[in-house]
Image: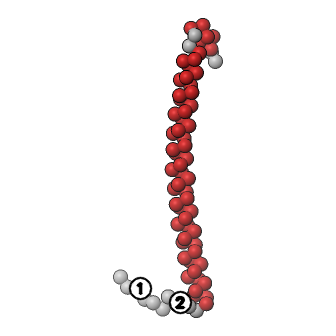
Amino acid sequence: LRGLDLIRVYGRGDAELAQVTEAADTIRDRSLKVLRIAFLSSAVLEFFASVSVAIVAMYFGFTYLGMIDLRGVPFSL
């Protein structure tokens, strides 16, 4: 705002407006790219969390119904 009078005197208003518009568009594009990556990664993490909860729920449900019993199976590597 301090240089607004000088911009008007030298007739650079349109050029400065174009530069501000270009800078705002660049910031918008970069922000959208970051947000796209953030939402994609959170969706992937939420998907795997949901699948993990479903697997644990199925294990406990089938064990409670007596359909599977993995407690007596020894683990060997």
User: In which quadrant of the rendered view does residue 63 lie?
Assistant: bottom right
Q: Is residue 77 above or below residue 21?
A: below
User: In which quadrant of the rendered view does residue 67 lie?
Assistant: bottom right
The percent coordinates of residue 62 (x first, y second) are 58, 86
The percent coordinates of residue 1 (x first, y second) are 64, 18
Colour scheme in the image? Answer: secondary structure
Q: Is residue 6 visible?
A: no
* Mark toward the start of the polypeptide (1 vs 2): 2
Question: Under tag 1, what secondary structure?
Answer: loop
Q: Of residues 25 and 56, which is closer to you in this image?
A: 25
Determine crowd level at label 1: few under 14, some 14-19, many 20+ residues with C-alpha closer than 10 A. few
Q: Residue at 55% of width from left, 47% of height from top?
A: 35
Q: Residue at 52% of width from left, 45% of height from top?
A: 34
Q: Seen from this angle, which residue lies furthest left?
A: 77
The percent coordinates of residue 57 (x first, y second) are 59, 78
Q: Residue at 53% of width from left, 49% of height from top?
A: 36
The percent coordinates of residue 58 (x first, y second) are 57, 80
| Residue highlighted by disc 1 | 75
Cα–Cα span, label 1 and label 2: 16 Å
| Residue highlighted by disc 2 | 68
| Residue 29: numbered disc | none
**For this view, does 73 lie left or right of residue 64?**
left
Determine crowd level at label 2: few under 14, some 14-19, many 20+ residues with C-alpha closer than 10 A. few
